[in-house]
Every structure is written in structure tokens, then in C-alpha cells.
Image: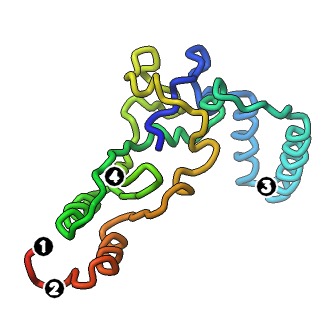
């Protein structure tokens, strides 16, 4: 699982999504929106014109070779910057799973198992992640961010594809515990 995907960003570009600076096109859209509200005929004509322009633009776009050096710039979701994971010892006993049930009872906490073992996933974005996908402290980012490799990351495929087990909360983990431990609901001390 990745923790951050900013190590290979070009500090000059340091971006994931398009700029939020208004453009002439934005002004035209605002004008179009004002006309749309009052004239339904204009809506059909403008919408058709936008579709034609959109298709023409798509035909002109060059295919960009995706490499580690530009992958973070192309990633619009900044997924790797929206959670952290914590490796766990393999749970074996009812007591181990009872602790995990308590942990996944908290908001934004999930659990998964993959080829590297068991992990808690805490879904919370980095406080330095800016709305445009940039790292707000790129030049001073932590070592783990600098050393993270994006050779194969969530831009390539969702992390979930590698999960052997995934528990999105208390109910899904409890169902697993009941299958794994036939006497899970027995009112004895947990061992």
C-alpha cells in the first residue's frame, strides 16, 4: 500500500489537477449559463456546439507517455495522500479480533489483508494536501513521502484489487469473526 505519491513530482509543476484560475472559457460558460436560464432554444444550440468542440478537442490531444516522473502530475485524485496504513501482527485469537472490532468501530477506519499481511487503513487526507492536489510542503515533505515509489501505485490500479480480505467496518468484520470462530457469540471470556 502506498502512503504518499509525491516523491517523483517535479517541484516546478507540483500539481495534480488543472489550475483553478478563471479562463476566457470559464467566462464564456458563465455567460452561456445566464442565457440558458432565460432561453431554452439557446440551451440546445449551445449544448450541441459544446459537444462538437469537445469532440474536436479530444481528437487533437496527444497521448502522453506515463512515466514515474510525470505520474503524480497526471493523477487527479491524489489517492495516496488521502489515507495512512498501519501494519498489524497477524490476528489469531478471539481477543485479537475483538481489538480489531473496536478499532474499525471508529470513523474512517477499515481493515484489510493482502500479500504483505494485515493492515488498518485510516482514511484521512494529509493536512498539507491542497485543493488542487499539490503538496503544500513539497520542499519540506517528510522522508516517507520523499522515498515513496510510484512505479506501481493507485494511478495504475486501485489498491483494493490486491486485497485478500477487506472489512469496511464493524458489521463486516463481525460476520467474518462469526464464521472463523464458531462459538464467537458464546458468553464466555474472550480468549
Q: Is residue 140 left or right of residue 107?
A: right
CA separation in Å, label 3 and label 2: 69 Å
Q: Which residue occupies 16% across, 85% down?
A: 186
Q: Kindly report which numbered mark, 4 or 3, lies closer to the viewer in this rendering.
A: 4
The residue at which mark 1 appears reads as: 190
The residue tagged 2 is: 186
**Residue carrying label 3:** 39
Q: CA distance from mark 1 to mark 3?
A: 69 Å
Q: CA distance from mark 4 to mark 2?
A: 27 Å
Determine whether, in the image, residue 26 is placed left or right of residue 51: left
Report the front residue among 88 and 8: 88
What is the crowding at mark 4: few (fewer than 14 residues within 10 Å), some, or many (at least 20)?
some
Give the spatial CA distance, label 4 vs label 1. Answer: 22 Å
User: In the image, 84: left or right of 157?
Assistant: left
Within 10 Å of the Cα at label 2, are there few (<14), some (14-19), or many (20+) other Cα atoms?
few
Task: Give left or right: position of 13 versus 160.
Answer: right
Residue 28: x, y in percent?
Answer: 76, 36
Say which of 102 and 125 sits in front. 102
Query: Which residue lies at the image location 12% right of the left edge and 73% below the top edge?
Result: 190
Q: CA distance from mark 4 to mark 3?
A: 54 Å
Which of discs 3 and 2 lies nearer the camera? The answer is 2
Which mark is drawn over residue 158? none
Quadrant of residue 182 within the rendered picture? bottom left
Distance from the alpha carbon under mark 2 to that under mark 1: 9 Å
Amino acid at each position: 500500500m502506498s502512503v504518499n505519491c509525491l516523491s517523483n513530482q517535479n517541484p516546478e509543476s507540483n500539481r495534480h489537477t488543472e489550475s483553478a484560475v478563471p479562463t476566457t472559457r470559464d467566462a464564456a460558460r458563465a455567460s452561456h449559463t445566464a442565457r440558458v436560464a432565460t432561453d431554452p432554444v439557446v440551451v440546445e444550440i449551445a449544448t450541441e456546439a459544446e459537444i462538437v468542440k469537445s469532440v474536436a478537442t479530444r481528437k487533437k490531444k496527444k497521448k502522453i507517455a506515463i512515466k514515474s516522473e510525470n505520474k503524480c502530475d497526471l493523477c487527479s485524485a491524489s489517492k495516496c495522500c488521502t489515507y495512512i496504513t498501519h501494519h498489524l501482527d497477524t490476528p489469531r485469537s478471539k481477543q485479537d479480533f475483538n481489538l480489531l472490532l473496536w478499532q474499525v468501530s471508529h470513523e474512517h477506519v477499515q481493515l484489510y489483508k493482502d500479500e504483505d499481511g494485515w493492515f488498518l487503513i485510516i482514511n484521512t487526507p494529509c493536512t498539507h494536501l491542497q485543493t488542487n492536489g499539490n503538496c503544500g510542503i513539497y520542499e519540506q515533505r517528510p522522508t516517507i513521502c520523499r522515498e515513496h515509489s510510484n512505479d506501481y501505485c493507485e494511478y495504475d490500479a486501485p489498491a483494493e484489487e490486491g486485497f485478500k480480505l477487506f472489512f469496511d467496518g464493524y458489521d463486516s468484520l463481525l460476520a467474518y469473526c462469526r464464521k472463523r470462530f464458531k462459538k464467537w457469540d458464546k458468553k464466555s471470556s474472550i480468549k
